[in-house]
Image (spheres, rainbow, N blue to C red):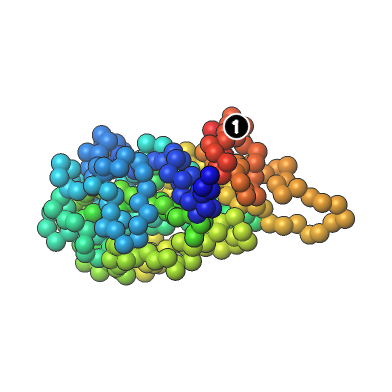
Amino acid sequence: MKLLSVAALSLAVGDVSAHYIFQQLSVGGTKYPVFQYIRKNSNYNSPVTDLSSNDLRCNVGASGSGTETVSVRAGDSVTFTLDTPVYHQGPVSVYMSKAPGSAADYDGSGGWFKIKDWGPDFSSGSATWTLSGSYTVQIPTCIPSGDYLLRIQNLGIHNPWPAGIPQFYISCAQITVTGGGSGNPGPTVSIPGAFKETDPGYTVNIYSNFRNYTVPGPAVFSCNGGGNPGTPPPTTTTLVTSVRPTTAAPTTSSSPTSPPTCTVAKWGQCGGLGWTGCTTCAAGSTCNKANDFYSQCV
């Protein structure tokens, strides 16, 4: 009987795990139908894992054909909503790329600049990620008017490299920015090319000595030269503890890996082979085993 390698097992786990897709756009207070202004992909809600693929731009099979373009004033807020809330640990980022003509005809081969990152918060002594069913960002007020691709991605790093392969969950909306300014957004990067196997934010093992994190890709652009705070996700956001809590000072008796107060919010990971984080689900959810490597609060 042929045994699978650890790498093969990790890949198999990634393949069978449930996924999600950014499929619906809201502008201001108006929520539009699924895929009306978001390019529809052809791989359902599966991720992209090939760093050299053009699919990293807007997802597999996602073109401007049949996708409408929505008008957005510079400074307005735009919201991406998913079919299932994000639950794989990892950053969420929003990029923009100006089309040379219409957004529907643009393949995303030009420069991309980043306008928002949601990275981990280490203030509680362990890492928490902003996991939500929707993400809202403000279009910079100073960017030139015109057609753009507005790209959102979640980089799932729950399968640590190199045994596992990080996963990109991606969608692109087509927008026409009106009332813009004369800013020169940057730095810009090419996609593919913006993410590499040597990036610390791509290769990091979030289950071992995870104390800091740098989101892959360029610095966030804002009109005032600093980080663009964007708009926080709605109140439905769940912050999930993804790694073991800070180790307490040694005592004469052994202490549990997860203290009694350590809980995992709904949709977060609560177990699996090698898991050392919290295992108790928040009230209203239970830890459900998907496979030997991954259990989730549902």
Q: Which residue is mark 1?
A: 286
Residue 129 in view here: no
226 w.r.t. 258: above or below = below
Residue 163 in view here: yes
Q: Position of residue 297 (x, y in %)?
A: 56, 36
Q: Position of residue 14 (x, y in %)?
A: 45, 46
Q: Residue at x 37, y 48 (%)?
A: 47
Q: Which residue appears farthest toward the front when viewing the image?
A: 1
The image quadrant that residue 179 belongs to is: bottom left
77 w.r.t. 246: above or below = above
Q: Residue at x 30, y 42 (%)?
A: 43
User: Would residue 236 be found to the left or right of residue 176 on screen?
Assistant: right
Q: Position of residue 94 (x, y in %)?
A: 35, 55
Nearest the eye: 159 or 200: 159
The quarter of the image holding the C terminus is: top right
User: Would residue 149 be found to the left or right of residue 131 on screen?
Assistant: left
Q: Which residue appears farthest toward the right when viewing the image?
A: 252
219 w.r.t. 170: above or below = below
Q: Residue at x 19, y 56 (%)?
A: 107
At label 1, the amino acid type is Thr
Nearest the eye: 163 or 196: 163
243 w.r.t. 112: above or below = above
Label 1: few (<14), some (14–19) or many (≥20) C-alpha neighbours in 10 Å: some
User: Would residue 86 be found to the left or right of residue 282 on screen?
Assistant: left
The image quadrant that residue 96 belongs to is: bottom left
The residue tagged with tag 1: helix, strand or loop? loop
User: Would residue 173 be found to the left or right of residue 275 on screen?
Assistant: left
